[in-house]
Amino acid sequence: MKPAATHMAAQEVDVCIVGAGPSGAVAARRLAEDGFSVTVLERGDWPDRTTIRVGEPDFELWPGREWLWRPDDRRGAGDQPLDERDSDVAALMWNGVGGSMVLFAAQWHRNMPSDFTLRSAEGIADDWPLTYEELVPYYRRIEREFGVSGLNGDPAFPGTDYPMPPLRLRAWGTRVARAHNTLGWHWWPGSNAIATRPYGRLRTCTDRGSCMFGCRERAKSSPDLTHWPDAVALGVRLITRAHALRIETDARGRASGVVYADPDGGEHRQRARIVILAANAVGTPWLLLSSASARHPDGLANSSGLVGRRLMVHPFGAVAGVFDEPVSTWPSPLGQQLYSVQFYETDEDRGFPRGAKWALAASRGPFAAVQDYPWGQADFWGDRLHRTVRERIERSAFWGIFSEDLPDERNRVLLSPDVRDDRGDAVPKLVYRYSQETERLLRWHEARAAESLEAAGATKIYVAPRARNTGWHLLGTARMGDDPATSVVDGDGRCHDVPNLYVFGGSTWPTASGMNPTATIAALALRNTERLIAARRAQAVPA
Amino acid sequence: MSALVLTRDERRRLARLADLLIPAGDGMPAASQVDVHDGGADRVAALLAHVVEPVRRALRADMTLEDLRRDDPEAFGALTTLVAAAYLTEPRVQRLLGYPGRPQESAGYPDAAESELHDLVRPVREHWRAVRE
């Protein structure tokens, strides 16, 4: 049931941003530094770290409802239900100040230079309308803004300048590193958005490993720590529990503001001269499609018909190895110990394009040792149980495989035809299917990852079944490009159809890469904010 | 919060099945010796509501574990989840496993470690240069 009245906010602001995750945070702070008036609408609340349960014996079983990964499981203030019946992968996110960085594993990677030129270099998918080299200065600044630890000098990522040394390499990481040196395969100490020294508001990591269920120590970087306190101090008005419902346009077709609901269901209108959507690759297309009007019957900024289409999620594989002696993997963050891009680039002999990044991660605690993921469903009950649990918690590590996910217009976010939220609005519906190519890619990489672990001394190998709860990297539902007929926004994130409406975040990506996306999401937000500032007097009215 | 309301007979059956799944051995107690069938099961059921109904079904079925696994995999999965969760999150069991939980490690990342890392990555740089350049 919708309320009858919409309350007008008293003041028009220069910029209204929807979403307080990394893109919104970077943009808001940067705009405020240049004197813009900024209001940010965030569905959720600030994270409350006092509820993190990392010290409890049953932490593995129950990290607390606030820290679950699926909005439908969490049902927090900012969580809208999702219709995922037609998706092989569940969308994972955290809706609140800081966005999904609050729960991410903190693995930090730039995209590779080749990720920007797939069409021109390999004849597949699309090029980005910008290059790796253009982003390098922004990557560097962002790595300092967020506080990234890592070892500089990886030849695969030219120009890194991480401000902190990497997490310490443990015995199990060193084993795999030496094995790769013997095999002649790439590896490098993990780069993570985890502080290894006191850094701004971040404290030094204490290796508790609760990264993906909230960091009580405040060692893992997220915008609620690194950006929002500064942004608010600079005058940004951050409104939490403000559920953006639709973007409104004026008679000239320009965005005029955002209508949002407060927790009691009351509607408010925030007028703005510029609107930036930074609501991830599910929330952003949902909002554009929900903003349909007589003038824009297929949704706002959707003359290309591509709003919501080309959803990409980085299909995920995992291979675990059990070593022949204890390696004690549990004192470790869930960020990566090390990574490999040995098989990241296309090799035509493999029979599929592109590749994947591997991240070596710690095994978990005793309860995780008997889960289907990553261990499969082998029968270990009865007399074998104790031995199995011990060897998995004392002697194992696993490779996570983040695969390239080429765009397919059939994979998409749309408005659900039959599932509605508490307000009666259609919820986002995800349609996503693994392609046969993805399955071939993952199987090939799983076989190589098994070889890696065997070379490191693993005597047992477990290839994980495909897991549904792996949709962290939501990308590609409002793609950028130079041609308004085949893209939603231009290379600056500016909508072709609505020149004072911008989209920041992973939804603009034309291709997915095979990298953890936060570095590139944030670097793009910084670049595009500065280009917006430079061009702010040149807002044009569409013909 | 979901409650695992069970009869006395169902508790006894849960203890019997739990001990088949997790018997004593290798210096570890059997499931029933750490109250998996009683307080442990209640504790888990309160957190994992989705296991309650299939566990009840498993306890009411007159089947061996093998038959249950084959004929009602959902009930078998729920039963094993409940038993394993109650057992493996029990502090006494974790102590016997040598699992310390997630204590805070001493902080600090010594600079010396970085020079060792540079030695370890030298072959990576050389290999990459040989292959890519």
Image: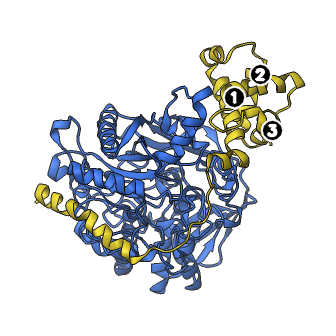
Which subunit holds the residue at mark 2?
B
Vertical position of residue A72 compared to residue A262: above or below: above
In the rendered structure, which amino acid carries the disc numbered 3? Asp
Between A243 and A314, the one nearer to me in the picture: A314
From the image, tell me which residue sits under label 1.
Answer: B79
Between A6 and A295, the one nearer to me in the picture: A6
On the picture, is A281 further left or further right than A141? right
| Distance between mark 3 and mark 1 Cα atoms | 13 Å
Residue A490, position as x, y percentages in the image: 32, 62
From the image, tell me which residue sits under label 2.
Answer: B59
Quick check: marks 2 and 1 in contact, CB under 8 Å?
Answer: yes
| Distance between mark 2 and mark 1 Cα atoms | 9 Å
Ranked by sequence position, the earlier of labels 3 and 1 is 3
In the rendered structure, which amino acid carries the disc numbered 1? Leu
Residue A367, position as x, y percentages in the image: 61, 42
From the image, tell me which residue sits under label 3.
Answer: B42
Residue B90, position as x, y percentages in the image: 72, 45
Which chain has been coloured yellow in this picture?
B
